[in-house]
Image (spheres, helix red, strand yellow):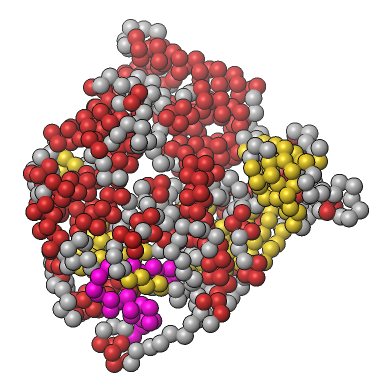
Amino acid sequence: MADGQQFKKRLPMSIKNKYHFAELNEAQIEAVKTVNGPLLVLAGAGTGKTRVLTSRLSYILQNNIAHPSQICTVTFTNKAANEMRIRVEKMIGNSVAGWWLGTFHSLAARILRSNAELVNLKNTFTIIDTDDQIRLIKQVLSLENIDEKRWPARSLLSIIQRWKDMGLNPIDVKDAFHSGTDFANNQAIKLYKLYQNRLLTLNAADFGDLLLHVITIFQKHSEIKKLYQNKFKYILVDEFQDTNASQYYWLKTLAEEHKNLCAVGDDDQSIYSWRGADVTNILNFEKDFKNTKTIRLEENYRSTGNILAAASGLIAKNQSRLGKTLWTKGEMGDKINIRTVFDGKQEAESISDEIESYQRNKNSLNNVAILVRAGFQTRTFEERFLKIGLPYQVIGGLRFYERAEIRDAIAYLRLINSSDDQLAFERIINKPKRGLGDKTIRQIEQYSRSSKLNLEMAAKKLAETDELTSKASSSIRLFSKKIDKWREDLSKNKLGELVELVLEESGYIEMLKKDRSIEAPGRLDNLKELVNAINEFESLQNFLEHIQLVMEGANNQNLETAKIMTLHAAKGLEFPLVFLPGWEEGLFPNQRSVDESGESGLEEERRLAYVGITRAKNNVWIFNANSRLTHGQWIDCIPSRFIDELPDKNINRFSSYSNNFKSSIASEWLIANNKKEINLSKDYIDENNDNKFKLRERIFHQKFGYGKILEIDGDKVTIDFEKAGEKKLMLTFIEKI
């Protein structure tokens, strides 16, 4: 039938009930009953993969195809494992003893405990957490006389974790072939080896070691490998598209004997490459496992027809995919709404208006989700919701003003504003690190109490004596000098410029730039957004008072809340009403991802867009802004290419501004900076307009420079830029030359 729909054949009810098939469709039943050989289940969003997994396990157990101890089931979270156990035991009517069920880490740890001596560990080894890892790495750096301020411990940890995810021991890492080897002047491999030796000395392993050690054991001890290969008759793994190299090797090794590996996943939802996931694992499954049977779950039980058609049309633009088309027997429902707004502030206002309207129609706020590409986007929504009293939660992360880097920056501002702010002084006196240890801090605190001086003044006084080490005294004097300078800058600079000066001159930005952890770029983006936030205020005092009110308001607990989260955090969730703001080039698709990974990065961004759309059950709103305020400058925004890739028949387009509209913040900024208003009229396409653009005409764009027009499509134009290549833009943002 059209649109990928087809009628589903149904088994006789007696057979269905016998094997728990009553609520399964034909494709799901086939996945459950296929128990011989490798099986790839491509489970699209909302197609019931969990039900298939649990039904398959029940089918194997109830028909005595394998004993529980012969089944290894791998999940990505302990929560998922626990839920699966409960479901299976409910289906079969009793507990399942001996079943190997858990995460990659927990199952690998179990194997390692039994064979620890083969990698020079005792079976009583300790599994250390991130804090302990950082502590050990700091010790290694110190012994090698490497400056931690220049080469942060977290950066090295991130490099080591990445190598372990790739299944690489120190001896396996080769210079120039793997990123990160240049750490501390090409000492990364050496430091990795020293770190591993230190772990062995302590009879400890980190999480990356759990799989890495087991892989090493399998490679060097064939009898152990054979033991586990024979043991596991059936292996099932959920979220297979999220596996990294070492996880894939581990699974592949275990499945070599019986070949009964069932991989359940969705290549279209592979969105975690930044933490080691490799989409090629699922794309190459059929090549790596001969005689693989592939079953596509395409009947969706979550979303309306228009949502599924739009999502399918978008993801079809990806080249690296196995291919499937979601469909539903349900209603087509409303089309996806795409709304263009003037700026970020109007975006937040428009979304809040829609939510309030939804709420007035007796709908719960729990049904509402705002899914952002980057964490810094939450600020405008948080402030808007607090202003109008709309209860909300930030899921999977902290509220904007609760984030560590934001609190650090605000602490600097608080101290600049008041030398009596003791808490602010304590927070940032050694952040970034200035060589001030706990002993020095205690001396300052003791002198502050005895002399009845605030901490800042006490530190200044002590730095002029011999009470502190010369290094500590020098560091405090330099810090005090900077604080005094920033207080002078406060009277001469705009607030946003002051924040930028403080963050640069304190070394805070440099600290984050050297941090190679996956969180560091997001922290830098958050600080940029802080600059945008403070530019809205007339004085530092007003801004700090605003923060106090925001934090107080955020503590208001409410049972029903709108949910704000990143697209990554939303995977696996569903909501009746979904808002997707910030669909603009550079923001989404994210420019950093595209620059670093090229076409594969762009395809992952598109998969992320697909995930966002398919979270919705009934309604989707996509927003893009014409302009955004960045570092005190208005930047013209280009609509995301993903908007143009959505099928026209499944979308409605709206505009929330007129020729005379400007948000209040935009108006204020334009007036204050004597800037000409952006012309939002469409006169340029009028036949009688002298400024009408023509094909092959040479033009100029503020961001991309000079180029020639290749194609004009209504109010959009395709341009071949001399340096930036081919781009699709709004005609509004190009100039005649």
Please give the range of residues in magenta: 22-47
Please state which of residues 104 and 597 is positioned toward the viewer in this rendering: 597
Q: In which quarter of the image is residue 280?
A: bottom left
Examine the rendering and report whether any part of residue 282 can be seen: yes
Residue 38 is one of the magenta-drawn residues: yes
Residue 122 is one of the magenta-drawn residues: no
Q: What quarter of the picture does the C terminus occupy? A: top right
Q: In this view, does 372 lie above or below 194?
A: below
Q: Where is residue 389 in the image (x, y as percent from the top left)?
A: 57, 56
Q: Is residue 119 above or below residue 72?
A: above
x 59%, y 51%: residue: 582
Q: In this view, does 208 lie to the left or right of 179?
A: left
Q: In this view, does 521 lie to the left or right of 691?
A: left
Q: Where is residue 225 in the image (x, y as percent from the top left)?
A: 13, 54
Q: Position of residue 49 (x, y in %)?
A: 36, 70
x 47%, y 44%: residue: 597
Q: Quadrant of residue 172?
A: top left
Q: Quadrant of residue 66?
A: bottom left
x 14%, y 36%: residue: 200
Examine the rendering and report whether any part of residue 113 can be seen: no
Q: Is residue 443 above or below residue 640?
A: above
Q: Position of residue 512 (x, y in %)?
A: 44, 32
Q: In this view, does 278 lie above or below 152?
A: below
Q: How many marks?
A: 0
Please state which of residues 254 and 94 is positioned toward the viewer in this rendering: 254
x 26%, y 61%: residue: 74
